[in-house]
């Protein structure tokens, strides 16, 4: 057994309006650079109110990053400047590498009950890959393997590996892992991680403990009320854990099961120049990108 990662920080999402008026929770973003390197942003757009999401994210550009959208309820209609058109349904993943530049739109639609559930993660690209050819991966739920482990733990493997199964998304420059994990009540689960990689867990249902000692005051909690005097070691729905370095992650449950997204990646360690949907290394590169968008030369790879 290696070193178990301790909790470095816990965050709670902040209500945010994005796109044409989509109500979402931003779990981390621009103000947290470079804490989550290579990751830049995580948005949670779960909602039971269609007026909170139907306005969507009309046509907009990206350069220098990857956007990873994972749906658990409802669907998103997608179109882009590479000629891709499609629907990202429940259980599906859209892994889009913007590279040198993509213009796209994402229009959320609810399920039959008007419920929408999804998450979007932004991952940075290193300087050497900022201007790579854009790439679009439409990952269907049927291609995502699910490992059933000891104690009834279930792991959907989107990227990386678990239980001897490898996810369908491969050949990503920051060597990421993206897992959807469910741990039943009264169980413990350990998952190996690569030392030196940034590792985070975002809880989407239930609650559990991500530190073996279960000490509530051993780490910083952002967005906590000044009048919260109870102090709990458990981590629940809508809370994110950023781990310190180590060889494996530990999670334990008591009376409630837990479902969470476990994400990791190799830090890039380069300067970040970020404005809106474009992330480069310098302010001059940002200026060029926005000038190209305005004069019509932003797209380097034309529609198929």
Image (cartoon, rainbow, N blue to C red):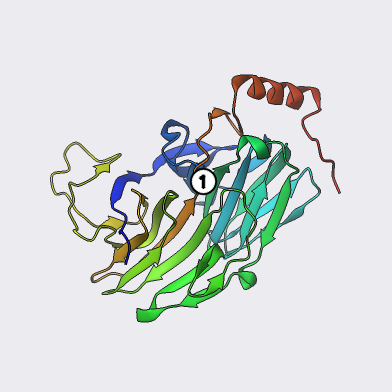
Q: Is residue 247 left or right of residue 62?
A: left
* Quarter of image, res 139: bottom right
* Quarter of image, res 211: bottom left
Residue highlighted by disc 1: 52
Residue at screen point 73% across, 21% down: 291
Which is nearer the eye, 296 or 267? 267
Q: Count the labels in the image.
A: 1
As drawn, which residue projects farthest toward the left? 229
Q: Is residue 130 left or right of residue 249?
A: right
Q: Is residue 294 above or below residue 129?
A: above
Residue 130 position, x and y percent, is 66, 36
Residue 218 position, x and y percent, is 20, 47
User: SS class of the residue under badge 1?
Assistant: helix
Residue at screen point 86% across, 49% down: 304
Quadrant where the N terminus sits is bottom left
Residue 23 position, x and y percent, is 49, 43
Q: Is residue 46 visible?
A: no
Residue at screen point 51% across, 42% down: 38
Which is nearer the eye, 193 or 98? 193
How crowded is the residue under tag 1: few (<14 C-alpha within 10 Å), some, or many (20+)? some
Residue at screen point 57% across, 60% down: 74
Residue 125 position, x and y percent, is 60, 40
* Quarter of image, res 296: top right
Q: Is residue 19 visible?
A: yes
């Amino acid at each position: 057994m290696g070193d178990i990662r301790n909790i470095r920080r816990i965050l709670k999402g902040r209500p945010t309006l994005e796109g044409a008026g989509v109500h979402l929770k931003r779990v981390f973003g621009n103000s947290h650079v470079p804490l989550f390197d290579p990751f830049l942003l995580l948005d949670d757009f779960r909602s039971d109110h269609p007026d909170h999401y139907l306005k969507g994210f009309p046509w907009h550009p990206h350069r220098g990053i990857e956007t990873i959208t994972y749906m658990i309820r409802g669907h998103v209609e997608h179109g882009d400047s590479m000629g891709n058109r499609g629907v990202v349904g429940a259980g599906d993943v859209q892994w889009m590498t913007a590279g040198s530049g993509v213009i796209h739109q994402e229009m959320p639609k609810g399920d039959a009950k008007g419920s929408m559930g999804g998450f979007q993660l932004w991952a940075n690209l290193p300087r050497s890959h900022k201007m790579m050819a854009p790439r679009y991966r439409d990952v269907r739920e049927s291609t995502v393997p699910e490992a059933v482990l000891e104690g009834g733990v279930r792991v959907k493997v989107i990227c990386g590996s678990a239980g001897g199964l490898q996810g369908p998304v491969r050949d990503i420059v920051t060597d990421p892992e993206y897992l959807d994990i469910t741990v039943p009540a009264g169980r413990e689960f350990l998952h190996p991680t690569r030392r030196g990689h940034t590792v985070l867990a975002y809880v989407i249902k239930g609650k559990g403990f991500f530190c073996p000692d279960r000490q509530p005051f051993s780490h910083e909690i952002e967005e906590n009320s000044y009048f919260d005097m109870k102090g709990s070691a458990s981590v629940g729905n809508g809370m994110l854990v950023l781990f310190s370095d180590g060889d494996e992650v530990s999670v334990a449950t008591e009376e409630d099961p837990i479902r969470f997204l476990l994400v990791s990646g190799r830090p890039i360690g380069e300067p970040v120049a970020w404005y809106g949907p474009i992330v480069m290394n310098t302010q001059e590169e940002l200026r060029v990108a926005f000038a190209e968008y305005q004069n019509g030369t932003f797209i380097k790879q034309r529609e198929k």
